[in-house]
Image (spheres, grey):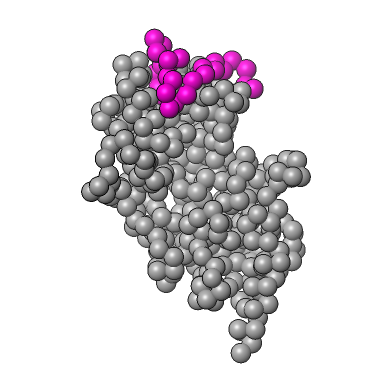
């Protein structure tokens, strides 16, 4: 079905303003988090951030410093923080944590773990010198696998996955010290942190993290493509659930968890109420503008054309996993712990502005689906509908 802007301008505007359209429409909590959290009632903390120079690190560091905390980052030194007052310790999480020894912090935020063995080393070094360990995990740690188009008919009106949902476990032939895939690495790392810091651990499990600074095609494709205009191919059922979180909302909330000493497991996903694929697309449209029209192409056709859902970096359409339980995880516990969400239209506009500020050769352009591929699929879809 093809939909023109005027048919959806009301819903797009509401979503762009931070309002979720459900059977009981309501305003998302704290549309502009900085307004509510400008002041603070807790004393500044000494915070160690493992990482701090990648995608989510810089805003985390900036926000923590702005709120009066004393911040130290630990990395390999390939990138430097340009935020005044930040201490930078250099080392390697594989084999050189010597710079962390003999020092004390109130809390550590571990936000760049790609190997559970890193957490084994860091928790052992820091267990007597840090009071609180915050581990940034992933919803990939949950034992809820997605297999192609298997669940394409499941729309998910209520969350299946919540904080007590089972996480991944090693297979029978796996032993400690072996490499582990991403989801298992996160699950193992959570267990290590809880075991080494009993009662002193916070686990945050984000879903798809988006926003300014994201150099991947995982979501940035959509603001770029929609702003370009023309007929946009959107995959699947418009009613499928979807979740994304602005990296600024996520990182600022994590800093507040550190300040408040909040313990436990939390899903770092958004927005505050169920969002459909359609609402996501039109929220982006409301944010970036343009003259796009949207053609929704169903899964049976895409499957026949060999188009796979984005469970790998080689897939065509980012942020589209039809029927996946991980595209609508429960987050009420996180909202109650202070997680807030800015309007997705603002995230889209800021992401597009950031992307356009980058050198041309670094911009994503057609790194997801190319314009030619899109045109071919749209033409084939028109033929199918015309039969």
Residue nearer the viewer, 228 or 378: 378
Residue nearer the viewer, 221 or 121: 121
- Residue at the limit of the structure toward the top, as seen here: 102
The reply to whether the magenta stretch includes residue 82 is: yes
Q: Residue at x 53, y 24 (%)?
A: 76
Q: Residue at x 57, y 37 (%)?
A: 55
Name the spot of residue 384 as percent of width and height, x first: 60, 84
Taking 190 as reference, is 286 above or below it? below
Quadrant assignment for the C terminus: bottom right
Q: Residue at x 59, y 26 (%)?
A: 78
Number of numbered labels in the structure image: 0
Name the spot of residue 239 as percent of width and height, x first: 50, 67
Taking 368 as reference, is 149 above or below it? below
- Residue at the limit of the structure toward the bottom, as seen here: 387
Q: Residue at x 59, y 71 (%)?
A: 296
Name the spot of residue 306 as percent of width and height, x first: 54, 70
User: Which of the 4 quarters of the picture holds residue 202?
Assistant: top left
- Looking at the image, residue 355 sits to the left or right of residue 150; the answer is right
User: Which region shows up in magenta?
Assistant: 81-108
Q: From this viewpoint, is residue 153 visible?
A: yes
- Looking at the image, residue 316 sits to the left or right of residue 309; the answer is right
- Residue at the limit of the structure toward the left, as seen here: 172
Name the spot of residue 325 as percent of width and height, x first: 39, 59
Residue nearer the viewer, 326 or 302: 302
Predominant SS of the magenta segment: loop
Q: From this viewpoint, is residue 157 visible?
A: no
Quadrant assignment for the N terminus: bottom right
The reply to whether the magenta stretch includes residue 121 is: no
């Amino acid at each position: 079905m093809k939909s023109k802007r005027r048919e959806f301008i009301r819903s797009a505007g509401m979503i762009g303003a931070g309002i979720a359209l459900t059977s009981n429409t309501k305003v998302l909590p704290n549309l502009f988090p900085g307004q509510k959290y400008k002041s603070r009632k807790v004393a500044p903390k000494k915070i160690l951030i493992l990482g701090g120079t990648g995608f989510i690190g810089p805003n985390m560091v900036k926000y923590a410093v702005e709120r009066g905390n004393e911040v130290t980052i630990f990395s390999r030194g390939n990138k430097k923080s340009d935020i005044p007052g930040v201490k930078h310790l250099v080392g390697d999480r594989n084999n050189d944590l010597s710079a962390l020894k003999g020092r004390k912090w109130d809390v550590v935020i571990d936000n760049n773990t790609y190997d559970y063995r890193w957490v084994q080393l860091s928790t052992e070094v820091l267990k007597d010198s840090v009071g609180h360990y915050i581990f940034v995990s992933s919803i990939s740690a949950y034992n809820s696998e997605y297999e192609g188009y298997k669940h394409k008919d499941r729309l998910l009106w209520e969350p299946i996955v919540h904080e007590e949902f089972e996480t991944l476990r090693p297979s029978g032939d796996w032993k400690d010290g072996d490499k582990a895939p991403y989801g298992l690495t996160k699950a193992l790392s959570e267990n290590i942190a809880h075991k080494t810091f009993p009662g002193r651990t916070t686990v945050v499990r984000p879903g798809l993290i988006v926003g300014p600074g994201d150099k991947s095609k995982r979501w940035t494709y959509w603001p770029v493509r929609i702003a370009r205009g023309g007929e946009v191919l959107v995959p699947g059922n418009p009613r499928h659930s979807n979740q994304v979180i602005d990296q600024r909302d996520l990182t600022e909330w994590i800093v507040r968890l550190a300040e408040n000493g909040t313990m436990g497991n939390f899903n770092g996903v958004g927005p505050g109420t169920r969002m459909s694929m359609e609402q996501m697309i039109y929220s982006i449209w409301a944010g970036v503008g343009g003259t796009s029209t949207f053609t929704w192409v169903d899964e049976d056709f895409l499957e026949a054309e060999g188009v796979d859902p984005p469970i790998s970096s080689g897939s065509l359409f980012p942020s589209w996993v039809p029927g996946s339980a991980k595209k609508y995880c429960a987050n009420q516990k996180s909202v109650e712990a202070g997680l807030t969400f800015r309007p997705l239209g603002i995230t889209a506009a800021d992401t597009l502005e950031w992307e356009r500020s980058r050198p041309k050769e670094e911009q994503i352009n057609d790194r997801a689906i190319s314009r030619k591929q899109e045109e071919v699929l749209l033409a084939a879809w028109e033929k199918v509908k015309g039969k």
